């Protein structure tokens, strides 16, 4: 039987402070948790309303509703230990890496992590003021991609500067950039995506070596002012992988 203390501890994981203090996050859904159990991530505890696995604790539906972060509680919830990755292992000189500058919407971040997984990008480097990748909304939006994509947080402007000084190509999307469909692009480097409303910050822009633009169709059409950052990321990654 789940205790009141456990319920309080799990509910605290809804906030970043609680996740930092406990070094854990929550994941919900039978499929996601099955993937987590088979991954290298450490699952601390599994709660379920129906017998699934020997290491899962069966609890009442009303208790699941108390610990769930979903509007409609799922049948399974897990407490998972937050993984720790070494930023020095990221090698944009050899691989394609995503960098997120102040992307603050959890849904956007989760979708971008899922996109990175789809396009074979294993590392995302975020500014410290980007959304927390272990936010429950982010975890759900990744659809399991959080298991395979390593998310790092750092002083992004400084990291980009260091990469540029090391000869790495830094790509960014701007309204005054070159047509992404007609510009030669490499198979490695850093793709910087900016804040939902303000784009790439001036500090990060200084390190961009290749300014790209996703044109509307037709090119002279007057329509939406900009694309959602997750949509723009999908188009950009697709173009890089197309060769």
Image (cartoon, rainbow, N blue to C red):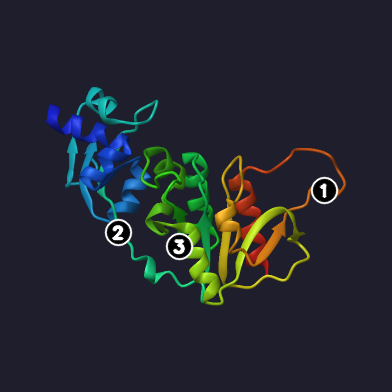
Give the Cα distance between marks 2 and 3: 13 Å
From this view, report whether residue 85 is shown above or below residue 138.
below
Where disc 3 sits, the SS reads strand
Return the x and y of residue 16 as percentages of the image width and height: 32, 40
Side (left or right) of 192 relative to 235: left
Left or right: where 238 falls relative to 111: right
From where the camera sits, is residue 118 visible? yes
Residue 84 bears which disc, if any?
Answer: 2
List the single residue furthest toward the top: 62
Q: Quadrant of the N terminus?
A: top left
Mark 2 and 3 residues: CB-CB less than 8 Å, in contact? no
Which of the pair 182/116 is nearer the observer?
Answer: 182
Q: Nearer the viewer, mark 1 or mark 2?
A: 2
Mark seen at residue 70: none
Which residue bears the numbered disc 1?
Answer: 217
The residues tagged by marks 1 and 2 sit, at their Cα atoms, a distance apart of: 43 Å
**152, 141: nearer the viewer:** 152
Q: Callout 1: helix, strand or loop? A: loop
């Amino acid at each position: 039987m789940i205790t009141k203390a456990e319920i309080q501890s799990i509910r605290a994981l809804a906030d970043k402070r609680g996740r930092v203090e406990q070094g854990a996050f929550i994941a919900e859904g039978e499929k996601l948790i099955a993937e987590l159990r088979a991954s290298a991530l450490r699952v601390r505890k599994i709660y379920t309303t129906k017998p699934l696995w020997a290491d899962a604790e069966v609890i009442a539906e009303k208790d699941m509703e108390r610990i769930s972060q979903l509007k409609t509680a799922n049948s399974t919830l897990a407490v998972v230990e937050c993984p720790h990755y070494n930023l020095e292992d990221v090698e944009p000189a050899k691989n394609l890496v995503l960098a997120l500058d102040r992307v603050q919407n959890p849904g956007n971040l989760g979708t971008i992590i899922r996109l990175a997984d789809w396009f074979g990008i294993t590392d995302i480097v975020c500014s410290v003021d980007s959304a927390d990748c272990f936010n429950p909304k982010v975890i759900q939006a990744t659809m399991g991609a959080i298991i395979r994509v390593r998310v790092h947080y750092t002083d992004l402007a400084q990291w980009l500067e260091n990469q540029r000084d090391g000869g790495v190509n830094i790509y960014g999307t701007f309204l005054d950039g070159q047509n992404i469909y007609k510009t030669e692009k490499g198979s490695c480097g850093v793709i910087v995506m900016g804040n939902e409303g303000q784009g790439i910050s001036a500090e990060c822009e200084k390190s961009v070596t290749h300014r790209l633009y996703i044109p509307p169709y037709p090119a002279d059409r007057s329509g939406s002012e900009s694309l959602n950052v997750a949509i723009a990321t999908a188009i950009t990654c697709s173009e890089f992988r197309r060769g």
